[in-house]
Structures are given as C-alpha cells and as structure tokens.
Amino acid sequence: MSRATARAHANIALAKYWGKLDEGQNLPAVPSLSLTLDALVTTTTVEFDGGLAADELSLDGRAAKEKEKKRVVALLDQVRAEARLTARARVTSTNSFPTAAGLASSASGFAALALAATRAAGLDWSRDAVSALSRAASVSAARSLYGGFVVLPAGGKSAEPLAPGSHFPLAMIVALTRAGEKSVGSTEGMIRTAKTSPYYAGWVEHAPRLFERIKRAVLGRDLGVLGPAMESSALAMHASMFAADPPIVYFSPTTLAVMERVRELRGSGIPAYFTMDAGPHVKVVTLPEHAEEVAIRLAECNGVLEVIRCRAGGDASVADAPAGES
C-alpha cells in the first residue's frame, strides 16, 4: 500500500499536560488524562510517490507554510527510515474544526498523519508504536490514537487507554471565543514558561496530585470530584503561563465571561465544569442530560462565536482498511 487515509479525533485533557522533560525527545513533564471527542475530527491522506521531488502538504485546502511542514517532514522521515523508502509523500489533511486555535488540532492531526503514513508505507505497527511516533511530533497526539479516557504518563513514550467513553458518559460543550490562530504556539509557550516562570516548578510538583484525583474520579464516575479537580488543573497550568516573562495570556474577555456563566449554571443546580487549553476557547463538561441547556446558555454569552456539542470519540482508524480492521 502506498496510499492510506486515516481519521483521528482531537482530545481535551482533563488533567493537563504542560511542559517537557526533554525537548529533544518530546517527553511530557507531567502526567495527563484526556477525553477523546467525537465531533472534532482530522482526516489525513498520505501517498508516497516516487515522482515527487519533495514532500507536499495541504492543510484545509491550502498549501502549508514551511514552518508547518517541518514536523510533518520529520515524522515522514522516521517512517521512511523504518520502511526503507526513499519516495516523497503527498499529504492532504482537513479538520472539521478550527486549526491552531487551541482546540487540539495538532493532536488529531499528527495522530492521523502517523497512522496514515505507517499504513501507506506498509508498516504493520501496533497502536502503541503509532502513538509513540505521533508523540514525537506532538505530545498530545499520543492520546488521540485511542478513544474514550486516555492517560499519558510523565515521561511516557506512548499513551494508554484508561476506560471507554461508555464507562462514564459525559458531554463536552466547546465554546469558541475568538476567531483565528492563537498568538503563541504551544511549544513556544511551554519553553518560555519552563525557562522564565517562577510558578513552573510548582506546576510540575502539583500536577501529578491533580492527575491522581482526576483519574480516581473518572474510574469512580464521580463528576462532583472530577469537575473541581479538572478546573484546578486548567487554572494551575494557566497560572504558570501568566507568570512567564513576557506573560502568556490566552484568555479573552469572552473566555472569562464563559467561565462565569459556568459558575452561574452550577449555582442553579446544573453540574457543569470548565477547562481551557493553550488558547482562548472554553470546554465545559457536564452530564448528557444537561448538554442541550448548557450549550444554549453558553451560546448566549456575548462574544461566543459558536458552540460545538461533543461526546466521547473512538479510536483513530484507517478509512480504507478492510472491514473490522483499524
């Protein structure tokens, strides 16, 4: 097979990842736990073609910039080395949601790329090995190989499935609060935080304790414990960024308004809890029976551009695999 198409879902960390143990190896400094989402999907096709002079990359219908191609080519080079290929590749990737805006598009993007590239190159790798390949390009991508609740240990080379989404059915409502790409990329932001923030050491020390609380809450299906711990993880991560030099502030006024709306919802008896990644958008976790009301209330916030209703998504898969294979 010299051509393959793969689909992968973005994942949102409930216990946050921020910081690397070793930039060269791209290993996470803290453990993380995520939920893979059904509505946020990347579809990527990789075709190795001996007639190409260089790798080609198209993102959402446009030719990729050189900076965007760098990590893609590095991953393809790893695949070529393992498969003993010399052919360049034509890569076409599309997202069902905004790219590079703090919605984990790099996670689903590199997970789909790693799966499609290995299959197109004829490599019959395990899911664990593909997870490790994607992690080398984007740490959070390791988790997008799996559906449901997923763990990536501190220093881990690949992610581990924790529980299927059906174990603890949750809804996640994504509130888009600003258009366009974020001003500081995640990799740049992590490096700056680690080098300059006096709060970074505290984050690295405290994050594993929050991770354990969140893991126990997921396994115990306890939203009353999960929600506050999830909010603490997000706010502690952002606090370390606020103290960087210069500060990294992803929040917009609408971000804060949505956070306040979530607190109002809880005050009215609706279990709803927020989290934010490295971007301005707010993700709100609630029970499925409250999803519609939460979505309506978030959409009413001044400045919210769109709300996306999500539930747990499945494993990354090869679109043109034989029936029953993924």
Image (spheres, rainbow, N blue to C red):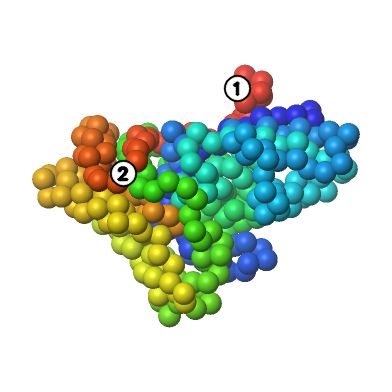
Residue designated by label 2 = 304
Q: Is residue 304 visible?
A: yes
Residue 122 position in % (x across, y down): 78, 34
Q: Which residue is mark 1?
A: 324
Residue 286, picture quadrant:
top left
Which residue is nearer to you in this view: 114 or 180? 180
Q: Amino acid type of disc 1?
A: Gly
**Rendered-image quadrant of the C terminus:** top right
Residue 203: horizontal and vertical position, in percent? 41, 71
| 66 in relation to 39, above or below | below
For image coordinates 25% across by 42% down, the residue present is: 298
Nearer-the-camera pick, 276 or 318: 276
Q: Mark 1 Cα within 10 Å, few/some/many (few <14, many 20+)?
A: few
The residue at the point 78 percent across, 43 percent down is: 55
**Going from the N terminus, do you reach mark 2 or mark 1 first?**
2
- Check whether the beta carbons of the residues at disc 2 and disc 1 lie within 8 A of each other: no
Badge 2: residue crowd in 10 Å (few <14, some 14–19, many ≥20): many
Would you identify the image quadrant in which residue 188 lies?
Answer: bottom right
* Element on which disc 2 rests: loop
